[in-house]
Image: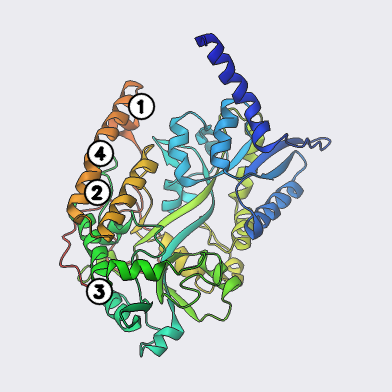
Amino acid sequence: MTLRNALWCLGVVAVIAPLIIWGPIPETRVPGRTVISYWEKWTGFEGEAMQATVDAFNASQDRVFVKLLTVSQVDRKVLLATAGNEPPDVVGLWSYNVDAYADKGALLPLDEYCADADIDASDYVPVYWEMCQHRGRTWSLPTTPATVALHWNKQLFREAGLDPERPPETLSELAEYAGKLTIIEDGEVVRLGYIPAEPGWWNWAWGYFFGAELWDEESQITCDDPGNIAAFEWVASYAERYGVQQLQTFRSGFGNFSSPANPFLSGKVAMVLQGVWMHNFIDTHAPDLEWGAAPFPYPDGHPELKYTTIADMDVLCIPASSQHPDEAFEFIRYVNSVEGMEILCMGQRKHSPLREVTEQFTRDHPNPYIELFADLGSSPNAYIRPRMGLWTEYQSELTNAFDRVWLGEVTPEAALSEVKARMQPKLDREIERWARRGDRYAQGLGPERLGTGMPPAGWELGDPAPATGVRTGIDILAVPSP
């Protein structure tokens, strides 16, 4: 096949593939309005919450009509559709998509739109605005945010002789509580108080809770620094205490996350790190569960690491070849108003990423711990995944390293050194590519780090989000064994 024919074939695939994957999009005509297409990933009550937001926008004005379409694997399909110049006008993505998609030229930057609409960082809790930034530009705006916290089963605390209203505050207390809550009969684990491998969604991120970072946000991978090594040593201590084989056998009996057989909902695990969304699953599958939520414990002797959390969110973007970008941003602007955001976040039972929140939203929210999750987003120790185009690959490497350490195949130091050895050359090449393109980020002019500074003296949950800071070094002391 000639190069010319090959390119022709690729062009045909790019154009017809959307029709093959999800079929023709039904045409909608609304007299006097511009109809824009919006692809979103949500189903169930989450999809219903966004549909309610769309309906409110459509009713609020008579110029634009949004047609919402639920699309599976939306992140992959929007790339294909954009390549074929047939994308939706608006797409709902995950925040981690933004960096790579911006680098691929698949998204329209929103800086001028935001400036015209008087939207800027002052409107948002800093960590959520940060997730919309990449290489000095704004590529998305928030929809629903999330933070994570320790969840505990109050009934099991009571049965173990623990105060059900007092969760562990430090890692040594976490280990102590876990020991009292764990039940082992005839060498087999019947119930676990806590293990870092459950649910296993943030195995790459434990270093954050030890004051570490995964890169310097400029040019260096830092997964092998002392804080990350200390975190993996802490992880390994749980596997060593209970035995890898015994834990694997026990975990093989866990049911699906979204079911009554979920190990936390069924009482097989007494404490777990989970997000603001966990309330929805408790309410659906274990409504009688007596539970609590609190900041995850911090390393002993390091109160400056209190209120550490992982923050994430969903976002709205405009594909680069959108046919109606002005109208698309008008909808995005509505979603990011107090009214639109509270319709959406109340419907999905999450907190708002906006600084301005109505009293009614907090008062009527069904999640009894919604203020905790909102306040954690304002913590100086609220972390997000590294903003780099290589993040998906880096995350996979870190997760593999976690698994090897958990299984006792390699030491934490060796596992993380290997990750750095593989990822640093790839990051170097990425920086070189952007330097050749004159990218301002590669020249050290990227956005400042947010949400990673040391807490101001006396900062407590409920205080306003602090100004941007720069993390200083932290000496990690001895790690408490479980």
Nearer to us of marks 2 and 4 is 4
Total labels drawn = 4
| Category of crowding for the residue at label 3, using alpha-carbon neighbours closer than 10 angstroms: few (below 14), some (14–19), many (at least 20) | many
Reading the image, the residue beneath label 3 is 482
Camera-nearest label, 1 or 4: 4
Towards the viewer: 421 or 122: 421
Dot 2: few (<14), some (14–19), or many (≥20) neighbours within 10 Å? Answer: many
> Could one spot residue 59 in this view of the protein?
yes
Q: Is residue 280 above or below residue 433?
A: below
User: Quadrant location of residue 378?
Assistant: bottom left
Nearer-N-terminus badge (1/2): 2
Image position, residue 120 (x, y; %):
49, 44
Q: Earlier in the sequence, mark 2 or mark 4?
A: 2
Three-letter amino acid code at disc 4?
Answer: Arg
Q: What element carries label 3?
A: loop
Q: How far apart are marks 2 and 3 (CA)?
A: 23 Å
Tell me, yes or no, if residue 224 can be seen here.
Answer: no
Mark 1 and mark 4 residues within 8 Å of each other at the beta carbon: no
Q: Name the N-terminal-most of marks 1 and 3.
A: 1
User: Dot 1: few (<14), some (14–19), or many (≥20) neighbours within 10 Å?
Assistant: some
Q: How far apart are marks 1 and 4 (CA)?
A: 24 Å
Q: Nearer the viewer, mark 2 or mark 3?
A: 3
Mark carried by residue 439: 1
Mark 4, residue position? 422
Task: Give residue 223's mark.
Answer: 2
